[in-house]
Image (tube, grey):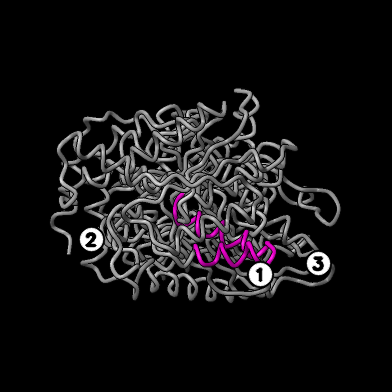
Amino acid sequence: MRDGFVKVASGTPVIRVADCEYNAGRIIALMKQAAGQGVKILALPELCITGYTCGDLFLQDTLLDGAEAALGRILAETAGLDMLTAVGLPVRAMGKLYNCAAVICKGEILALVPKTSIPNYGEFYEARWFASGKDVDCRVRLCGRDTALTSRVIFREQSMEQLCVGVEICEDLWGTCPPSIALAEDGATVILNLSASNELAGKGDYRRDLVSGQSARLVCAYVYADAGEGESTTDLVFCGHDIIAENGTILAEEHFGTGLVISEVDVLRLSYERRKMTSFTATCGRNTSISFRLERTDTLLTRKVERNPFMPKNPGRCEEIIRIAALGLKKRLEHVHAGCAVVGLSGGLDSTMAILIMAKAYDMLGWDRKGIVAVTMPCFGTTRRTRSNAELLAESLGATLEVVDISAAVRQHFADIGQSMEDHSVTFENGQARERTQVLMDIANRKNGLVVGTGDISELALGWCTYNGDHMSMYAVNGGIPKTLMRHLVAHIADESEEKLAGVLRDILDTPVSPELLPPKEGEIAQKTEDLVGPYELHDFYLYYAVRWGFAPRKVYRLALRAFEGVYDRETLLKWLKNFYRRFFTQQFKRSCMPDGPKVGTVSLSPRGDWRMPSDAVSALWVKELEDLK
């Protein structure tokens, strides 16, 4: 449970209809199996102690007595398990019968949660036997214990306040106002659903969307346990569709199976997102709180940790991202009545992405792409490869190419300020970067144009840009695009392009990332960015989890160890993580005055949008947390 990770499971035991003793044995075996795999929260199906398809047998005391005895056996034989479990059975109370979830932990019944939405349409006939548990709040005697029967209850783990569990049953989720809404608003981060949802063609997709959507809407983990093999097939078939979702993402799923579906939910992540979302309604005290306690043990992670969290899985998402960025630029060009759009085209990845977005915006406007002025500015570090690619790219896109050699201007500037040409310090580098920006700005002024920036969000996070050099533009189309995503987008465009353009794009993708501010060595790029600041795939990973989810440095490191196992060793991961935090804090002043640019994903560092941070914030707390790690 360290770092907020809690191992949860939904389980579907093989049962026999009305054979409570047999079912108890299968449930106990499944519970022990789950506990043996480190599960702390387990959901089992609706009415699984008796079977959901008992029909009028539910009215027989023999079945109800058998269900109570079976629950007593389950309590006795699982008392040593460090796990909270919700198991379904029918319960008599106040002259009525209720379809309940018995929430049990270490041999005790914490409470009985009744189903509130009783389906009585189509193939469902539950109102014949069961009463709605809505607004029911009473005490019942079950298994020799005095137990609460109420739908207004949440279960809070004593040592981890973020682990708060709520329960609803099957149709409760399908109704217009599921109980899980009030449970989540009152603090429940994990919702368990005990279900017996029969299978129909196409229903699985709807069920999956319903569970995923509810977990997103409530910013919660949703553990859905479905009835399966052993239920009567007189008229219906049950297929054990077990789902674990977290904030809109399916973490684990099994359809047409039995046994356990296991994953880890991150309750700290959910709590952070709720704090951040001002639209998330928080209440207090609408539900009774019942506490339980679990041992604080490390959770072995099995859930997938994305190595490239910014990278979309759906190819259509690439087109969407490019279109969003292009729409932003289109609006700006229209608004300022730009006579042209000017970009510094280096033959590198960032400027390539920028001009591709510019081409898209011009096409949307119906403007001639010759209005795109691509300026290549060779200087001391320019290689033949990048210059050639810049020229070929401009030609392939139909842009206007201008070549401005800035070597003489930079030499004169260095002479003016007393900078030696042999001193390849930061002044040597930044002098060239600022000269490039001056050239672009002045060309834009002369042509009544607008300078389009090329820097990306990965560089902004690290401050890897020259202040008032490539840091500045009149509209920064890449400002919301991380480096790893940019590579993916350019590769996507290459795959969709004609042969000439595709060839140029693929060669650009194969070119090392570099500002080309130091003289080449034997004609090759001498200054490779990732050798200096670290691999961008690591920094994008760190950026995503540190900024998007607010994870502590230790947790970011832990996730990196899992995501990059076999790719980078521990020392390398830690080295660049420390560098990330150091640079992220010291370079905030550059982000505080960054130009306008479109947000295209969930992470933005714009001071006018998602990220507001003082430029003088100190990183001591974050760095200290990493000092003792190995």
Task: Tell me the SS state at disc 2.
Answer: helix
Toward the viewer: 482 or 146? 482
Look at label 3 and name its amino acid.
Answer: Leu
Image quarter where the C terminus lies is bottom left
Magenta run includes residue 507: yes
Look at label 1 and name its amino acid.
Answer: His
Stretch of the chain drawn in magenta: 482-508
Q: On the rendered structure, is 270 left or right of 421?
A: right
Look at label 2 and name its amino acid.
Answer: Leu
Looking at the picture, does residue 98 appear above or below residue 195?
Answer: above
Looking at marks 3 and 1 on the same chain, the residue that comes earlier in the sequence is marked by 3
Residue under label 1 = 255
Toward the viewer: 267 or 606? 606
Query: Residue 448 location, x and y as percent?
Result: 57, 26
Looking at marks 2 and 3 on the same chain, the residue that comes earlier in the sequence is marked by 3
Q: Identify the residue at image location x=76%, y=48%.
A: 119
Task: Tell me the SS state at disc 3.
Answer: loop
Q: For residue 75, which quarter of the picture? A: bottom left
Task: Tell me the SS state at disc 1.
Answer: loop
Q: On the rendered structure, is 127 left or right of 414?
A: right
